[in-house]
Image (cartoon, helix red, strand yellow):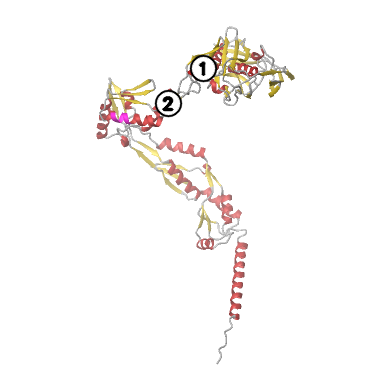
Amino acid sequence: MKKRKQDFRPLLKEAVMFLLGGGLGAILLICSWQWIGRKTIFPGVRVAGVGVGGMQKEQAIADLEEKISQLEVKIRYGESSWGVPRQMFQLEPERTVEKAMKIGKKWSPEIMKQLWTGKIELPLMGSLKAEEWLGWQAEIEGVVSIPSQVAKLKVVNGKYQLINGEDGVEVNFDKLKGLVVRAVTTLDPGEIELPVENVRMRLNPEEITRANQVLEELLDKKLEIVIEDKVVTLQTPELISFISLSPERLGEVEQESVSNYVGGLAERYNRVPQNARFVFENGRVKEFAAGKEGINLQTEKTAESLEGAIEQLVKGETDIKIEAELEKTPPKIATGEVNDLGIVELIGKGESYYAHSITNRIFNVELAAARINGVLVPPGEEFSFNQEVGEITGATGYKTAYVIANGRTELGDGGGVCQVSTTLFRAVMAAGLPISERWAHAYRVGYYEQNSEPGFDATVYAPSKDFKFRNDTPGYILIQTINDPANKHLIFELYGTSDGREATTSKARVSGVTPPPPDLYQDDPTLPAGEVRQVDWSAWGAKVVFDYKVLREGEIIFAKTYVSNYRPWQNVFLRGTGE
């Protein structure tokens, strides 16, 4: 008897229909899900403990703002308490609600599960205002904190005596900030116990004995630090300053104190390489200042050596000598290279006069000019006026005189330095060298027009304004200063090797001339009352243009047009108000 084959087609058809129906149902479910939550927050969502599920945006914001207005968080310490000011926080309920409304908009099984179990909790968004927090922190610190004091040694009747330290109390403000932020962003009212830490600095009798033993070991001992050809000597007062008298590290060498001390040595003894200085006389170049190696004290290695030496003294050694770790850098131009520099002739000269300058201005002109004198510019390198002259402050030797700053004349260190940069600018143009940076003054200055047309000036004001040029000649360029303070006459001569170039500057073209404003009087308490002294002279405003062109064998090497826009300026008088 023949078997009949079973027909699975009806079953397959039913399965396909079931899957299609299930898929369609899932799509309808998801669409319904999205439709239900399009304008409301899904059920199960909470913000800072507030159930906002099922709410529309405006209602959720209103509920949060009401809860914020009722929030009271207090900090307690013993009998004292402080309320946390709500204005110290920039809370953002609207942004938080907008974030809550996005939950569930993209369907996923995990979101479904969280919403179903009500486990979606958002903190309130916001930020802490740093300035308000610091002010509030200072208020608490002033009441609670007790500064600790480390034990110290002082000399009494020629003998060292230990003064015991004092314990203190410190507030852990990092921990407090975390607690306060959590309380505010979760809208959790209540009291927070102020986190404080006791700081022990008072030595017990055993520790006092140990400290005195270390002191006795350092009495009448000596430690020498050799830095090149100099010797720095540390004796008992300096040595004991490196010893810790805190309970935790009693008798140990304090690394921070040693590092700070060695850092001070580096500031004192570090030296940049100093090129040999030369002068051109009677057709020859000769040296007037020898070159020096640069010194860079290696602070980390030297501090390690110093720390180890102090430890040896504590253990019983008597006198110790250590060598500071130095990194030396040779100068670019050494003494013996005088015959290889290619300096054979005068290639450029510039001059200016500074009559009517006050005493301090004359001093500054002489000082800055001296720091340029003898400088060598190697072939292919750029010269920076600010770099060569160095920092212009009272600490570096300059005196107070009137300078042009921020478009006005005012007292400042180094007034008169621009006389030097202006004169060098003229010498560089006479030599036909490419100028990479030059700035005109804010207004026409009478000093620079005593022997020149307007426009041939160059101001400097570190670090924003510099005067720079490049040596594109085949040899070194020597800058030589000739200053005559008696006649207020400054000259720069540039010596090197001529390559046949010729430089020309056109006549200055002046336009847009405007008259000076009325005279300006400034009170000066350094002058006696009733005395009037003129320190600035009126100048007409103008636009000044001149052409700078350099040729060699009839061909132009480079050319540039300089444009200076000068503001009109008035006479300035100092009116004494002093006794």
Q: In the image shown, does 298 or 419 lie closer to the viewer? A: 298
Q: Is residue 205 left or right of residue 392?
A: left
Q: What kind of residue is marked 1?
A: Val
* Residue 252 percent coordinates (x, y): 31, 33
Q: Can residue 566 be spotted in the picture?
A: no
Q: Along the polypeptide, which appears first: circle 2 or circle 1?
A: 2
Rendered image quadrant of residue 269 = top left
**SS class, disc 2:** helix
| Circle number at residue 266 | 2
* Residue 310 percent coordinates (x, y): 31, 29
Image quarter hosting the C terminus: top right
Calculate the distance from the C-alpha at mark 2 to the C-alpha at mark 1: 32 Å
* Residue 564 percent coordinates (x, y): 69, 22
Q: In the image shown, does 319 or 98 lie closer to the viewer? A: 319
The residue singled out by tag 1 in the image is 338
Q: What kind of residue is marked 2?
A: Ala
Magenta stretch contains residue 287? no
Stretch in magenta: 308-312
In the depicted structure, whether residue 134 falls above or below residue 449: below
Image quarter hosting the N terminus: bottom right
Magenta-drawn stretch, dominant element (helix, strand or loop): helix
